[in-house]
Image (tube, grey):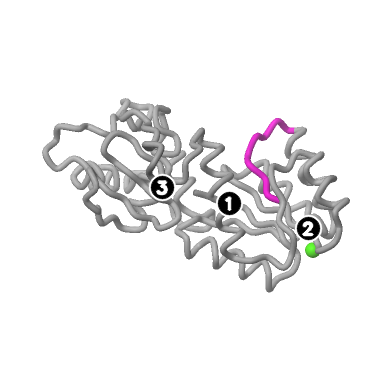
């Protein structure tokens, strides 16, 4: 998952960046509204966190501009305490959710996860495709209830494929969503991650969870499964 943080306060920007990176997310950061707007419209991000009080270009204008460009990326806005008008303005401009400062890390992460999974068409917190289950909150993956150990990059690839289960995801798109802008991207490495995921998730080579579409990319073929009503 690739998340953009637009926040002019360097300390908070650093905190949010670290918090999201600790969750295995790739973070792009901008310190003013103009740079934030640029990155939100030009970078392949999965979610944007935008402070409403920004220099150069106001946060509400950034949100409005992103929506005017037809971008459907989930947007979480940050507002100052007691400024209810800001929340309304942010939501009216096209934000999906808001958070009042000071930001509580757990609440921010819960909202980020909720927005990401809703954008992927998932409503329950745990994603289940066939026998594969992935919990973004704990980053635990299991195969038929047996835990599977994945490296950080393997996890990122699987999470992205599961979030878009049934869709074709190109190798380039996968690389863009699991590496930061400044990291060197080698899309051949994606093939290695896919091979290792197949080995770990399908040791008997029977399930075939990840399909390769020559020249187009990969697709998680297993059906999305709703959880039984009594499970959490
Ligand atoms: Ca600010």
- Residue 93 lies, with reference to residue 213, above or below; the image says below
Residue sitting at x 81%, y 62%: 80
Q: How many marks?
A: 3
Q: CA distance from mark 1 to mark 2?
A: 16 Å
Q: Look at the image and tell me whether residue 149 can be seen.
A: yes
Where residue 119 sits in the image (x, y, percent)? 56, 37
Question: Label 3: how many residues lie within 10 Å, few (<14), some (14-19) or many (20+)?
Answer: few
Marked residue nearer the N-terminal end (3 or 2): 2
Residue sitting at x 69%, y 42%: 96
Q: Name the mark nearer the viewer: 3 or 1.
A: 3
Query: Tag on residue 232?
Result: 3
Residue sitting at x 19%, y 32%: 207
Identify the residue position indicated by label 2 in the image.
79
Judge by depth and name the residue closer to the eye, 110 or 161. 110
| Extent of the magenta region | 69-76
Query: Tag on residue 62?
Result: none
Identify the residue position indicated by label 1 in the image.
112
- Residue 177 lies, with reference to residue 79, above or below; the image says above
- Which residue in the rendered view is the most extreme toward the left? 204
Mark 1: which secondary structure? helix
Mark 3: which secondary structure? loop
Side of 26 relative to 38 (left or right):
left
- Which residue in the rendered view is the most extreme toward the front? 230
Q: Name the mark nearer the viewer: 3 or 2.
A: 3
Mark 2: which secondary structure? strand
């Amino acid at each position: 998952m690739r998340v953009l943080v637009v926040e002019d306060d360097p300390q908070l920007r650093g905190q949010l960046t670290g918090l999201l990176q600790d969750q295995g997310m790739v973070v792009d950061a901008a310190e003013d509204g103009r740079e934030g707007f640029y990155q939100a419209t030009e970078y392949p991000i999965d979610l944007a966190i935008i402070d409403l009080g920004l220099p150069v270009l106001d946060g509400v204008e950034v949100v409005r501009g992103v929506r005017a460009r037809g971008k459907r990326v989930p947007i979480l806005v940050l507002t100052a305490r007691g400024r209810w008008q800001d929340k309304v303005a942010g939501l009216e401009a096209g934000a999906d959710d808001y958070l009042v400062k000071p930001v509580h890390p757990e609440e921010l992460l819960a909202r980020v996860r909720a927005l990401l999974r809703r954008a992927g068409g998932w409503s329950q917190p745990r994603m289940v495709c066939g026998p594969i289950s992935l919990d973004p909150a704990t980053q635990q993956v299991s195969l038929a209830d047996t835990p599977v150990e994945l490296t950080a990059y393997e996890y990122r690839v699987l999470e992205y494929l599961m979030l878009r289960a049934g869709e074709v995801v190109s190798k380039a798109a996968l690389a863009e969503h699991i590496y930061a802008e400044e990291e060197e991207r080698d899309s051949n490495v994606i093939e290695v991650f896919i091979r290792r995921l197949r080995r770990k998730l399908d040791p008997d080579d029977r399930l075939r969870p990840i399909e390769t579409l020559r020249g187009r990319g990969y697709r998680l073929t297993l059906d999305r499964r709703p959880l039984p009503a009594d499970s959490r």
